[in-house]
Structure formats: structure tokens, C-alpha cells
Image: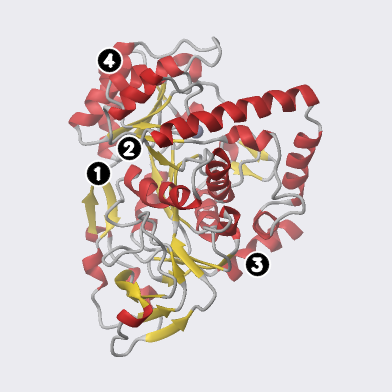
Amino acid sequence: MTGRGILAISLTALVVSSGVLIPSGAQAQTPTETITVFRGARLIRGDGSPPIDNAAFVVRGDRFVAVGANRDVATPTGAITVDLPGKTVMPALIDAHSHIGYMKGLTSGPENYTREHILDHMYRFAYHGVAASQAMGSDFGVMPFELRDEILAGKYPDAARFLTAGRGLAPPDEISPDNMRHAAYVVTTEEGARANVRELKYWRVGLIKFWLTNRNGQVRPLAPNLYEAIIDEAHKNGMRVMVHATEPENAKAALRAGVDVLGHMVEGVDEELLQLLRERPDTVVLLAQVGRRTIHAPYLDPPEPLPLETVTPAQIARLRDTIASTSPAALERAQANWDRTASDIMKLHRAGVRIGIGSDGGGQGGDRFIGFTAHTELENMVAAGMSPADAIVAGTRNGAEVLGLGDELGTVAAGKSADFIVLNANPLDAITNSRKIDRVYLRGQEVDRARLRATWAAEMAR
Ligand SMILES: [Zn+2]
């Protein structure tokens, strides 16, 4: 008897935590509950504390119920023991900024956006050990909200939690039909913006998205009264707000207006920006450091197992070609960009700014493979100078807090949902070891990665 049956809870069992719907853990108390003790792994808890070298933890139903040193954790009556010698366990990752349902093979656009395809992406996140991902403003229609609730209620045990900002909010210039921003609400008046926010509230969105960017002079950004109305209406309704603002002046303006999350790394971190962030310690910066991707992709030379198992050969070839055909001058510019970004990331980190993973995966900017990019974001943070331990905290605990799921996900701790990755090597030694995945557990259940791998292999063989 597996514990899966207990996860088929009804939608009425949903409770609201920090504005986001989560399944109620209390529903897990049934006689069919499986109790498992995992023993002998090195345990990284995701809260920045030192690893426990020889750990044990107990999972009952979908919850961690005890976590500690192996010798201190007793085996409950009727428990199954799983020995994990030589393995490292870390919390499942959180990708707080992605674009879900668009990328498919060599194409990316609204034509791929279906219920089945969103679900496929959530399987890809789970396969890579990502417990939850939030689509940032590119969803549309009622379907994504329905699918979100079904996944959160446990209907698809092998899928990561799908969270959605629903439709983002943007000025007219940002919209074009073949772009993800086709989904956005077009904001032209304060009252219209407020009504859009209230509609998102109706769909129980916890974190909303708006764009505030000039795109090198091509876009007339939202006027201050409009984005102030968005933020004010969201906060009045208990929702938080993320902005796409890559230019320093726009990021600063959004911070002054009260935005909660910067969805991208800002291009140029100065003392004024640091001061604004210090004064707002709850603000989170998601890095989305796609810049480094254009310089090299060492995971393709030779291809690592995860891309080989999940990405079509044509897509891998395209990314390889893109990198190979980049001119030396462009490479030099990309390297200079990355060097500046790296030093800016460390300015934020040293100032104590909360950093999280927002991979922008699945977006239109090229081959940002769904799920895998969460791991390359970890690698980029370490390349910038953060310790592997700090990068893991950013990718686990901080991300869960961004999505309002801090009580549920992000660390291995008693009472939280049992979402974790079993690794064959220690990511504290080399952060790329986060990709050496042996097994993934979501909500206390092992994700059937062999089945998922077989599905994708069959699709690629067609
Ligand atoms: Zn994005």
C-alpha cells in the first residue's frame, strides 16, 4: 500500500497560507499512512545550518515528522527503513520565476500552451527535484487556475506544484501577439489596473507580476500612478507583487512604490539600490542570470544525463550552435556582462539581501530548459562567489518564502511537506553535484522518474 491515496484530498481541504493555496496537512492523518525512516545520508537542511553527516529523518504520510542525527532518531512502530549510505539529501528546489507551458522542442509560443503541456512541464520540474514553480505573468484563461488547484490537492503525485501569477500587467507597448506578454492585462488607467488586480484576487493569486522596463527605449513604461495603483490594490487585498525591472532606475522606483520581489537581477547595483534594499529586508531579488548561458554551457560538453533525458537532440544542437557561432567580440561582451553581474550579485549578497532562484526557465530568450535551469542558477551563484551552502539556501528556503510557502516547503524540518532530493554526490563539495540526482520525493512520495524518462524517450524517438 503506498501513501498516495491519502493525497487525493478534496479541494475543500485547501487552506490559505500567506495568500497561496496549499493542501491541508491535517488531512494526511488516515490509517493508510506510510511511515518511512531514511537513514545514513548526509543531510543539508536548507536553512544554512551545517550538514548532519550521518542523519536520519522520518516521513509520515506527506510530512517530515522527525529530523536529526542517526543515533537520535528512533524508528516508529511499523515504519519502513530506507538506508542511504553515501548519499546526500537536500530540500527540493523552488523556482520562483518561470514561464510554463510555452517551450516545446524548438518552438516557444502560445500555440503550445495547453493543459497537457503545462502538466508536462510540472513533471519536468519534479524530475529535476524542483518542488514548486511559479509562472510569472504568462498564463491566461481559467484552465491554469483549475490545474493549479488539482496539482496542489495531490491529483498528480509526480508533478511539482504549479503556482501562477495569472496574467501579468503591462503597458500597451509590451504586448505582441506572438510573445508571452500577449497574456498580460493592458494597463492604461488606475481604475483598470485596480480591477485587474481584484480579478487576480478572485482567482486566489498570491503573487502578481508587472513589467516596468524601457527595453532600450523601445517601450514606454508604466507611469508611476499606474504601478503605484497596482501595488496598492495588491497589498490591500493581501497579495504580494513582483516586478520585471532590469534597469536600476526602474528597480529603484518599484522599490520606493513598495514592490515585494525583483524578478530579475538589476543591471548595475549601486549604493542607492543597496540602501533601498537594506531598508526593505523582506524584499527578495531573483537572479535569472541568463547572461552566463550565452558564454558557455559546459553541461553540453559532453551532455549531462539530465539534458539528455529531457531535452530533444535538436534543442541541444541549437544551443550548441548558438554558442559556437557567437563571435569573439560578442563573447567578450558577454563575459564582461557576466563579470559585472557577478560582482553585483556579491554586492547584494554581502549587504544581506535575500536572494532566490527565479530561472526565467521556459521563457522566450532561448534554450532555458525547464527544471534544469534551476540547477544552473545554483551554479551561477557559486560562480559569482556565493558559497554552495548559501546558494542552496537561496534555491530552497528563500524561494519557498517568495511563493508564500515558507511554512510548507524549502527546508527539511519536522512539520513540513516531505519534498527532498537524494543525491549521489555532495553539492557542498561542488554545486554541480545538485544535478547528480538519485531520487526525488515530493509530498512524501518518490517521483516515478523512470516512467517520466520513458515517456520523454518515446516522444523523442517519434
Ligand atoms: Zn520572465
Dot 3 or dot 4, earlier in sequence:
4
Look at the numbered disc 3 and give the secondary structure of its residue: helix
Asked if ligand 1 lies within 8 A of label 2, the reply is: no
**Pointer 2 with pointer 1, Cβ within 8 A:** yes
Closer to the camera: disc 4 or disc 1?
1
Vertical arrangement, residue 438 with respect to residue 169, above or below: below
Circle 1 residue: 19
Q: Residue at x 30, y 84 (%)?
A: 74
Dot 1 or dot 3, earlier in sequence:
1
Closer to the camera: disc 1 or disc 3?
1
In the image: residue 275, left or right of residue 462? left
Look at the numbered disc 2 and give the secondary structure of its residue: strand
Quadrant in which residue 414 is drawn: bottom left
Residue at the left extreme of this rendering: 236
Q: Amino acid at mark 1?
A: Gly
Residue 373, how many percent across, how many down? 57, 46
Asked if ligand 1 lies within 8 A of label 1, the reply is: no
Circle 2 residue: 207
Q: Residue at x 36, y 35 (%)?
A: 353
Q: Residue at x 65, y 40 (%)?
A: 367
Residue 40, how many percent across, how many down? 45, 78
**Pointer 4 with pointer 1, Cβ within 8 A:** no
Quadrant in which residue 413 is drawn: bottom left
Q: CA distance from mark 2 to mark 4?
A: 19 Å
Circle 3 residue: 454
Q: Amino acid at mark 3?
A: Ala
Residue 121, how many percent across, how many down? 54, 51
Dot 2 or dot 4, earlier in sequence:
4
Vertical arrangement, residue 375 with respect to residue 413, above or below: above
Dot 2 or dot 1, earlier in sequence:
1
Crowd band around label 3 with a 10 angstrom C-alpha radius: few (<14), some (14–19), many (20+): few
